[in-house]
Amino acid sequence: MEHNRVLRLEHGINFRELGGYENTAGQTIKWQKLLRCGGMSLLTNRDLTYLDNYGLRYDIDLRQANEAEMSPDRYPKNTKYINTSVYPFTDNRRFDRRLKRLIKRMVVDDSFNAQTYAQMVTDSHAVKVWQNLFATLLTNDQPDQSVLFHCAAGKDRTGVAGALIMTALDVPRETIMQDYLLTNAVFMAAEQYGYRYDYYQGQCW
């Protein structure tokens, strides 16, 4: 099967592969193992057939229950759906200025503040979500079968998940940041072709 960084779906939102990235040891992430995207409520039947043939077996939805109810995922019948929201945070704490400055240097988009990003990787509830995500990755041990993780836009929550996974695989930070920034390029390209997506309302126009 042809491999592309951005999957060629009719209505896939920021649908991307993590396969092909190299780590510091020169090893390469396998294709058809790790997928990331935004909302999946608009996928067409042709998209579902493509994803089924691609080997999509796990759909990990990082959105809150009300988001999932408002824009429910569409996925192949052979895919197991798991809704495990990163929010709400359970730890009531603030972070010192040094940590916030560090995260601000790493985050390019100001739509989420440094406090939110810090909580996404340290809050006890969020940590359990990431632990469950990694457990699913370990369960997916068959060749050419994929685990997909996503939020609404495939950007912030999904971006953190992708960064954690690639960090665990010892992918260089520069590569991780390039993949994070690719979201902006994908949305810009979509708008050039007259397609926009409201990832808060799950609507296209």
Image (spheres, helix red, strand yellow):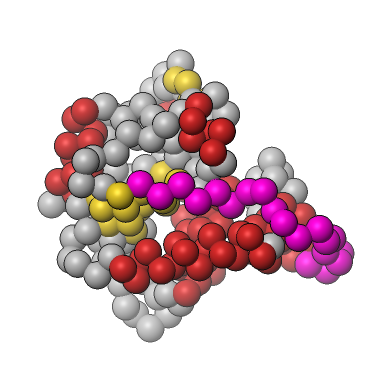
Name the residue rendered at 52%, 63% in the picture.
130
Evaluate whether residue 181 shows in this view: no
Q: Please provide percent x and percent y for residue 166.
A: 45, 68
Location of residue 66 with respect to 178 vertically, above or below: above
Left or right of residue 195, residue 32 in this image: left
Name the residue rendered at 46%, 47% in the picture.
83
Q: Please provide percent x and percent y for residue 36.
A: 40, 50
Q: Please provide percent x and percent y for residue 198.
A: 53, 25
Q: Is residue 160 magenta?
A: no
Foreground of the two, 138 or 35: 138
Residue segment shown in magenta: 81-99
Foreground of the two, 174 or 145: 145
Location of residue 142 with respect to 204 vertically, above or below: below
- Residue 110 appears in which quarter of the rendering? top right
Left or right of residue 81, residue 68 in this image: right
Q: Residue furthest bottom?
A: 25
